[in-house]
Image: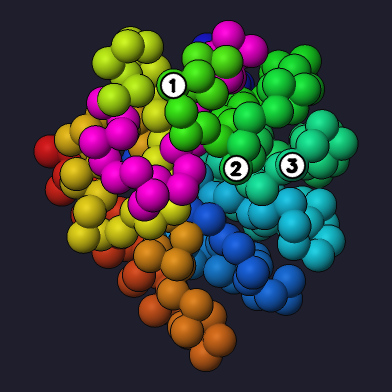
Amino acid sequence: MTRKEEVRAALVDSGVTAVLRGVPEDQIVDVARAVHDGGVRALELTADAKRCSEQVAAVDRALEDTDAVVGVGTVMDPAAARNAIEAGAEFVLGPHLDEEIVEVCNRESVLCIPGIMTPTEAADAMAAGADMLKLFPASTVGPGHIGAIQGPLGDVPIMPTGGVSTDNVAEYFEAGAVAVGAGSALVDYEAIEDDDMDAVRESAAAFVEAVEDARR
């Protein structure tokens, strides 16, 4: 199994990718550790964060002896994709489909998950060589949209993100999601402000438990 295949398996096995958006740089390592301790294997930092490359490298070092995989989201163009990969990102996500980003990732053997909404975008993404599809924002269309896409296109791997919570995560898995992405529904930002990493861990663990219950 290649490393790219291992990363894909980690995202699917974990069931949820934690989106660490807007976490202060001086807390990113502690937050990443707490979320991972809560049972989340896949951690997504965002390319629009200040000093994103340094943050990715720091989290990579902190979790290098664990089963965590670290990626970068909100990747808007090929240059950002290259920067993320050079920083150590093992998967790259975008809110949209840019076939040049997919090309960069495939050239570097890095998992690529572009954002899609329509069947046309989904088909174009898979034809370009995407590994998974990020249905974003999922809250706009709801769980039923997964089946609507998979109906004509087959069993394409879809990861809904944006509006997925412990209250509705089961509906997304029942609809055919292979994994989900979650930000504020998983990451307790009030606890981060209070520097309460135990609460951050507990919030992540609660989401992981909801995912596990949904997949039983």
Q: Residue at x 79, y 37 (%)?
A: 77
Neighbour tally class for label 2: few under 14, some 14-19, many 20 plus, Cα within 10 Å: some
The quadrant in which the C terminus is found is: top left
Circle number at residue 76:
3
> Which residue occupies the foreground of this view, 202 or 16?
16
Neighbour tally class for label 1: few under 14, some 14-19, many 20 plus, Cα within 10 Å: some
For marks 1 and 3 on the same chain, the one whose residue lies earlier in the sequence: 3
Q: Position of residue 17 (x, y in %)?
A: 46, 47
Does residue 93 show up?
Answer: no
Circle number at residue 119:
1
For marks 1 and 2 on the same chain, the one whose residue lies earlier in the sequence: 2
Q: Position of residue 23 (x, y in %)?
A: 63, 71
Residue 100 lies in quadrant: top right
Cα–Cα span, label 1 and label 2: 15 Å
Helix, strand or loop status at disc 1: helix
Magenta-drawn stretch contains 42: no
Helix, strand or loop status at disc 3: loop
Residue lying farthest to the left in this orientation: 216
Q: Name the amino acid, label 3.
A: Met
> Which residue occupies the foreground of this view, 51 or 68?
51
Q: Position of residue 207 (x, y in %)?
A: 30, 59
> Which residue occupies the foreground of this view, 23 or 168?
168
Cα–Cα span, label 1 and label 3: 21 Å
Helix, strand or loop status at disc 2: loop
